[in-house]
Image (spheres, rainbow, N blue to C red):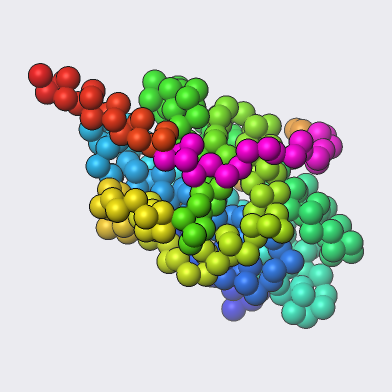
Amino acid sequence: MNLISYINWIVAKGNVDNISRTQYYYRYYVRNPEIEWSFLASIVSRNAGWNMTDLKGIYLPQVLPKSLREQMFHTYERANWLIFLDAFPQLMLHELSKRYNTSFFHLLKHFHVSEFMQKEWRTFWETKDRKRLMAALIINEQNVIQRPVISHPYYKRKVFHSFPFLVQDWLHYSSVLFPTIAGKLYGFSVHDFTDVDERIRLGKKLAWLLFHPDYYHDFKQFSERTEHTGSRQDYEQYIGMGKRRDTPFLRMAFPIIQHHRGDFSDWYKPIKRTEKWFKPIRTPKKYQITNWYLNKQNHLHNAISILTTKNAW
């Protein structure tokens, strides 16, 4: 088995579902802590799993039709799959380059990795600039999913222009959470999700928070001690809410999806100018969101209960 076939085999094993992706990202980070993006990817992947199982939980099925919930699941899953398919060969080539002390980044083109990331990996090999690589990988992943998922006519019409999605986006009901075993939640709400600039800005804010010296060890402790099942009970167990599980285990809720990648075009070629995405973010002020998030969830659940009771009458 040659190197390219070996990496494709590893990627296929890791890209089975949201659970396997989350595990592969985190285990890679443990082996290669200089690639900080991989830790960020594991936490964001956990959040994707929680969003997926919400669709089969107690509340959302009461107000969202099955067809929309299935389309939303496929949207999360497709984006999750595409990012792993693109990113993990990059991570593997770095690990092999490090192991053998020789650059294998000339092989990136065989995995249809953008010219942008080919240049950035060569730069990282020379400079070891972790922060620039983190930003580059955030920029790349959000552009990788923009055309095949976010701007794709099917997902645009069926999901991103649907009334429930627009309301959730407008009211900031969706959030990326970094939990701790002390029962606190950190993170940021998500809005203007279809805007690539906003998603990159959010990714950079999340990276800043994840490696904040005051909180990094708490987030890593959560990742080490908490198996990712896809259920929000993964973090709710630490909050002391005394609530029963209201979202299922992901692997009991959804089948394995067989994906195919039809578009191998390079997002970078028509753009070229990426300097704006490397600019530093303004330091966030509010990121401990435990009470804010729990109140948002209570409001949403109460609204669903009232709505379904009225409909029953």
Q: Which residue is drawn at 73% across and 53% down?
A: 134
Count of numbered labels shown in the rendering: 0
Residue 42 is situated, as x and y percent measured from the top left of the image, at 55, 58
In the picture, measured across the screen, residue 94 lies left or right of residue 228, that is right
Task: Tell me what residue is drawn at x 70 percent, y 44 percent.
Answer: 204
Image quadrant of residue 270?
Answer: top right
Q: Which SS type dominates the magenta stretch?
A: loop
Q: Give the range drawn in magenta.
A: 272-294
Residue 221 painted magenta: no
Can you see residue 114?
Answer: no
The picture places residue 165, in percent across and down from the top left corner, at: 43, 27
Give the position of the N terminus as an image quadrant.
bottom right
- What percent of the width, then of the height, locates residue 154? 44, 29
149 vs 240, nearest the viewer? 240
**Among the 4 quarters of the image, the one containing residue 275:** top right
Q: Considering the image in quadrants, where does the C terminus appear? A: top left
Q: Does the magenta stretch include residue 288?
A: yes
Name the spot of residue 75 as percent of width and height, x first. 44, 39
Horizontal relation, residue 56 to residue 156: left or right: left
> Which sits in the foreground, 44 or 118?
44
Q: In this view, does 309 lie above or below 296?
A: above
Residue at image point 62% right, 72% down = 30
Among all residues in the image, which is located at the extreme right?
126
Q: In this view, does 208 lie above or below 103?
A: above
Instruction: Relative to 2, say whether 309 is above or below.
Output: above
Q: In the displayed image of the protein, which residue is found farthest to the left? A: 313
Q: What's the residue at 48%, 70% (across, down)? A: 225
Residue 292 shows in this picture? yes
